[in-house]
Image (cartoon, helix red, strand yellow):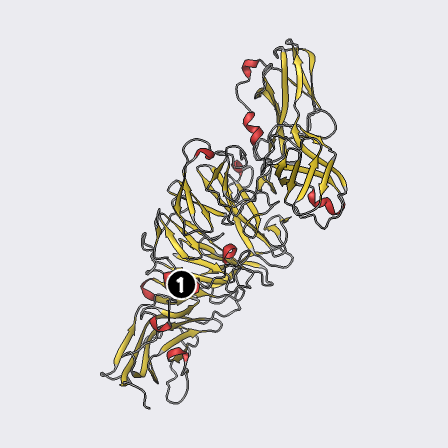
Amino acid sequence: MALPEDKVIELTQFNGIWARGNPDEVPQDHMIDCQNFALVSKGKCITRNGLNSFQAVVSANGHVTTFFESTILPAPIATDSVTAFNWLYLDDTGTLYSTTGGSLTALGAGADFTSLNMFNRTFVSPYFGRMGSKQGYLQIYYNYNNTFILRRAAGPAPREDSAIFAAANTGTTGNTPIGVHQYAVIYQTDTGFLTSPGPKLKQTGPFTVTPGNPTIIASATAIGEAPDLITGNSIEIRGATGAWLAINDFWNVTVLNPFQISIPLDSSGFGAFTGALIFYGIFTPASLNADGVHTVQLTNIPTGPSYVVQRQIIATQAGGTEFFFIPNGTIYDNTTTTFDVDFFDTDLVISADYLFDLMEVIPGGTGLCQYNGRLVIAGAFFYSQTALLSDVSNPESVNSVSDFVPIPIENDGNNLVGCGILRNILYLFREVGFWSTQDNGGDPSTWPVTVTDLTIGSYQKGLCGFTTNQTGASDTGDILLISAREGLYIFDGTVRRPELSFKIQDIWSQIPVAVGAGGFINVQVTQSVWTHQLFISYPSTPTSLYADALLVGDYDPVPGVLDPIGIRWSKWQFPWTPTAIKTGDNLYVASVQNNPGFIFKIDPTQLNDFGSHAINCYLETYLATVLPGWVNFFKAFRLRINGNGTCSITLSGEDGVLVQNTPATNYILNTLQNLTGAKGQEILQLINFVNEKMSMKIGTYGLNYYMNLNRVEIFALPRWQMRPG
């Protein structure tokens, strides 16, 4: 038994893992290792709650690589009081699903996506690897007339295939002023987006297509809207057959000269081009010399895709070139092809010219955020050094001339990957370094850009906001968290050092950052203000395809206390390796490991994972010693512990040698079995362990097992200053 002369090493605080340097350097109130514990305030260790199934997955294989909670409301909103939340998730074949609509679209193997809820729409931005993909255009997910729809954001201008859009004077008395007027059509979609004007003329070439990577297209006449067509603009191609079907889509082009462009398609194995190539590029309005006394009739008005709900006619004043909206010029359907208009030139006061510069498709990026009513896209294909921003309150309207913010162009592969907002300032993050800009009331292209930090950037999914811009109250003050190769940092206007990951830097430095895989694209950071925890998922090895490991940081719910020393780190492990995480009222987890095909959630009522998998929880204390360098006689330990099941303890000396297990028989008392609820006593256990130092690994692992640990006391005496011989 313990005697008065025994030296007592008392552990009353368990402040999480210390993984920085040699295990001998771990402070007394920290741990060498810790798994599946919640480290609550005042250093108490509690077995984490179990996972429960939350949302069934309708994917064919039950796998989930990325998921997002869409919070759009049903329509019509005025008659619906219940929100219909949908989970969007991607499986490892690259197929996107929703919990209400099943399979939505195939993004392609290796795809990923980021999402944002904004203006009762969910914006889905697909990408591959480290930047937006060549055809990964921004998608919108929304509810129209109680039907959930996924399609590309924005929309193409009206097209002219065969019937020619035309204008003629009627026999009906009217007021349209004498002179030449031009007429055009714009579509209005079911989300309220107004397309750029049309019709756009079908160009049939002849074109010469040169296979390769990239694919080069040439013509004897100007292509598209040359010379106004510039590198980065999109152009629609149709008409290819056979292997060349892959070219039938919108493409961001590189303009080599007015007669030659290239598109980012590797067609080197397609063989000679097959089909009849068609471009839709040149705006072709109807023109009429009005007689000044009659109305004007428009015929062969283009009709649009199914999501077009009405069309609007725009026109120029007599002899003018600027287009204006015509009062009473709205066609309230998508079927009428003949329509009469009549106006005075003085009625044409609202210009429509801005519509000509709108993107018909919007490149998807690796980062999305909302800033002053604008959608912000970072890391888009063709825009690696430029953030795209929408018009205010029109997140599908992106002006190719003015809706962008460029950062200094270096063309060194250090691309934009993310964006974040702090105190009404927009921050744009590269993999190394980030910049700030702020709304000055003008077009985004006029906003000043200032360097913030040139040494710290962000992983692709590595930004997390605890800011007043977020929904819900913050419990840590107004900050951003930035995860970078160097560590996890607090940013409150200044990058705070040391890094928040200071205590676990040896773990952090092992995150692989191979180009195209690993940390650059798989580290995720999120937080829960309900449970006061940070969650970081990351790839554990260079061959990990997904974020298969999880770090958890517990912090105290008092603003301003989130700091590198106060945070308490542990590791969590589940029966299925996590590929994606999300937080709300608790942690949500998804996996690609087969079946039972669910999105899971931490449930305070669960003692096991999914009801049938025991939680393997343990902690390993620091290497205790009475006198450094002396051989110590560790006589006993005492625990303030309660729980359920059997608590196993392993004792080890320096460098993990001289391992001894307890409970055992004979001279070691068997008092740690059958911990059923509160013990009503503290447990004293004899051990007779001799070594320079001793670490205790304390844990439980069995169905319905759990433990709460408050204090450890170790009784020891120094015996010999050195070992004999």
| 484 lies above or below 349 | below
Where is the C terminus found, in terms of image quarters? bottom left
Please provide percent x and percent y for residue 403. Answer: 50, 35
User: Does 246 appear above or below 672?
Assistant: above
Nearest the eye: 669 or 214: 214
Quarter of the picture containing the N terminus is bottom left
Left or right: 431 as drawn, with respect to 183: left
Q: Quadrant of residue 687?
A: bottom left
Q: Position of residue 160 (x, y in %)?
A: 70, 29
Q: Is residue 259 above or below residue 55?
A: above
Q: Is residue 470 visible in the rendered structure shown here?
A: no
Q: Which residue position holds label 1?
A: 505
Work out whether residue 171 or residue 102 is closer to the camera in this orientation and state it: 171
User: Dividing the picture into quarters, in which one does residue 158 lie?
Assistant: top right
Q: Position of residue 254 (x, y in %)?
A: 61, 39
Looking at the image, which residue is at 37% across and 57% down? 499
Choose between 641 and 142: the one closer to the eye: 142
Q: At x 37% / y 71%, what residue is drawn?
A: 22
- Residue density around tag 1, few if under 14, some if 14–19, many if 20 or more, within 10 Å: some
Res. 67 in view = yes
- The amino acid marked with disc number 1 is Gln
Q: Circle 1 sits in a helix, a strand or a loop, which is it? A: helix
Residue furthest bottom as drawn: 725
Number of numbered discs present?
A: 1
**Position in image of residue 683 (x %, y %):** 33, 78
Where residue 9 sits, quadrant-wise, is bottom left
